[in-house]
Amino acid sequence: MRVRQITHIIGLLFVIGVISGNAQANNLKTEKAILTAPPMVPPPLNRDHSAKVVIKLETKEQIGALADGVDYVFWSFGDTVRSSFIRVREGDEIEFHLSNHPSSKMPHNIDLHAVTGPIVAAPSHHLPPRTHIDI
């Protein structure tokens, strides 16, 4: 069996809106983000106000079948290879915790789509194995 290494970055897709940096964490209710594996999406948000949404995501290298007789080293994000869907509202403040599993051999990072703010997939955020970053 052949094992190949992924050499590109898998991105996260935020399902709803652009995250605004205008939220004030001190005044916001904190809630844990619901992450789902594609093609499933998180349930609708039943709130009409901004919140502080805490996201915890771990990268991990996992071997899986790419084709019959061909194994591949996939980069999983939240135990799914296609990454995870996360639903937030415009105006939410995001607290993001990314960790790279100790068994990983490669550094990993993420690319946040439709996100504004001071930290968005900068090269300095490549995480070596056994490390984590709070964004």
Image (cartoon, rainbow, N blue to C red):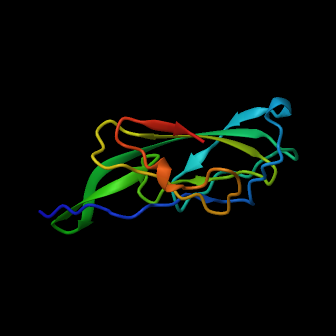
Residue pictured at 30% horizontal, 44% vertical: 104
18 and 69: which is toward the camera:
18
The quarter of the rendered structure image containing the C terminus is top right
Q: Position of residue 51 (x, y in %)?
A: 79, 40
- As drawn, the residue found furthest toward the front would be 124
Left or right, 37 with respect to 31, comes to left
- As drawn, the residue found furthest toward the top would be 26
The quarter of the rendered structure image containing the N terminus is bottom left
Left or right, 105 with respect to 40, comes to left
Q: Quadrant of residue 3?
A: bottom left
Relative to 82, say whether 55 is above or below. above
Left or right, 94 with respect to 80, comes to right
Relative to 33, say whether 7 is above or below. below
Q: Position of residue 79 (x, y in %)?
A: 42, 47
- As drawn, the residue found furthest toward the bottom would be 67
Q: Quadrant of residue 94?
A: top right
Residue pictured at 34% horizontal, 40% vertical: 129
Q: Position of residue 60 (x, y in %)?
A: 36, 45
Q: Position of residue 107 (x, y in %)?
A: 36, 49
Relative to 122, say whether 55 is above or below. above
How many callouts does the rendering have?
0
Residue pictured at 54% horizontal, 59% vertical: 111
Relative to 95, say whether 42 is above or below. below
Left or right, 74 with respect to 88, comes to left
